[in-house]
Image (tube, grey):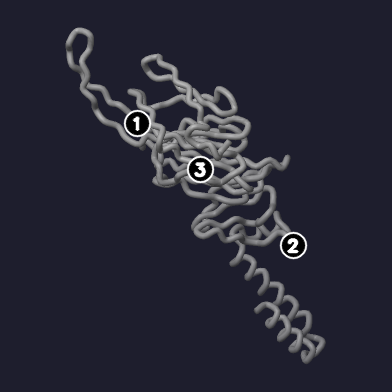
Amino acid sequence: MLTCILNRIDEKELRLPKKNMQQLKANMFFVFTGLLLLLLPQGVTAVETFSRDSEHRGIVDLSPYQIYPENRLGNGIYLDKKLLDSQPKRMILNITSIKNTKSYVYLFRAQNGALGLDIVKNDADGDARFWRIDPEFYQYSNSDFGIQRVFRIFQNKVFPLLAHLRTGGGVATSTNHAIFYHITDSKDITRTNSSGQQYTQKVYTFRLHLINRNFEKIQSLSNLQVQDISYRLKLKWVNEYSISYKLSNGKKETVDLRKYAPTYF
């Protein structure tokens, strides 16, 4: 469209008397300045800060988000024309919402070329934490709403792992693998102590999920269930194939994962 306009202006300019050419050029300057102010999320400041070329587009549409501009350190991520975040030493590449919250996780590339994730917190989400497990895996925890989620960087993209889960957590990583859990069930169980008195305890059932770092797919170990009276389960890699966990009663269990997911080793 702009090309057509320019062609028409050029044709008219050739027919104009010489004394009107200066006025025409001034009008063109104001027209294109106005177009830039309308199209760019940061107006004149953005034009001054960022130049564009064949590898740097203006606005990258990741509906409902926008990144401006593409492939630039210090670019910004927007939602409904509102700037969510921008860091001078980061190049923002992608973003995803944290399900059941009003916060966001975005993928960035640092000055040294390393990829990382960060969070845009919304005050409405209350007491929320976001931290790195290793360069590939991150965790989100919200104690006010009882939400735990796991995020992964894989093939230069950000992946919420099993995003439908509300209790994904406890990530433990090794050189080639990662494992985490979610709570599948909780129920009150009545027991009798050594004195013959009955008491009630809540028991949680955990399901483990295994990841091979070379693959995107997650292997859920549905044939392996762990139960404890604590809603947290600390997982630890013992060797290349096995993990261990310690129950509230002090009992320590070790599991050879080749028995449950042989194709992941």
| Mark pair 3, 1: CA separation | 19 Å
In this picture, residue 209 sits left or right of residue 173: left
Q: Amino acid at mark 3?
A: Ile
The amino acid type, in three-letter code, at marker 2 is: Asp
Disc 1: which residue: 205
Mark 1 surroundings: few (<14), some (14-19) or many (≥20) residues within 10 A: some
N-terminal of the pair, mark 3 or mark 1, is 1
In the picture, measured across the screen, residue 43 lies left or right of residue 219, that is right
Q: CA distance from mark 1 to mark 2?
A: 55 Å
Q: Who comes first in sequence, dot 3 or dot 2? A: 2
Image coordinates of residue 165 in percent, x first then y, are 40, 42
**Residue at horizontal 71 percent and vertical 73 percent from the top:** 29
Quarter of the image with the C terminus in it? top right
* Nearer-the-camera pick, 190 or 2: 190
* Identity, as a three-letter code, of the amino acid under mark 1: Thr
Q: Is disc 3 in contact with disc 1, using a CB cutoff of under 8 Å?
A: no
Task: Please name which of the two marks, 1 or 2, marks the residue nearer to the observer.
Answer: 1
Residue 250 position (above or below residue 21)? above
Residue at 74% from the left image edge and 62% from the top image edge: 53
Kindly identify which numbered label has been placed on residue 53: 2
Badge 3 vs badge 2, beta-carbon distance below 8 Å: no
The residue under the point 62% across, 61% down is 59
User: Which label sits in the foreground, 3 or 2?
Assistant: 3
Q: How many residues crowd mark 2 within 10 Å: few (<14), some (14–19), many (20+)?
A: few
Badge 1 vs badge 2, beta-carbon distance below 8 Å:
no
Q: Which residue is mark 3?
A: 218
Q: Position of residue 7 (x, y in %)?
A: 73, 84
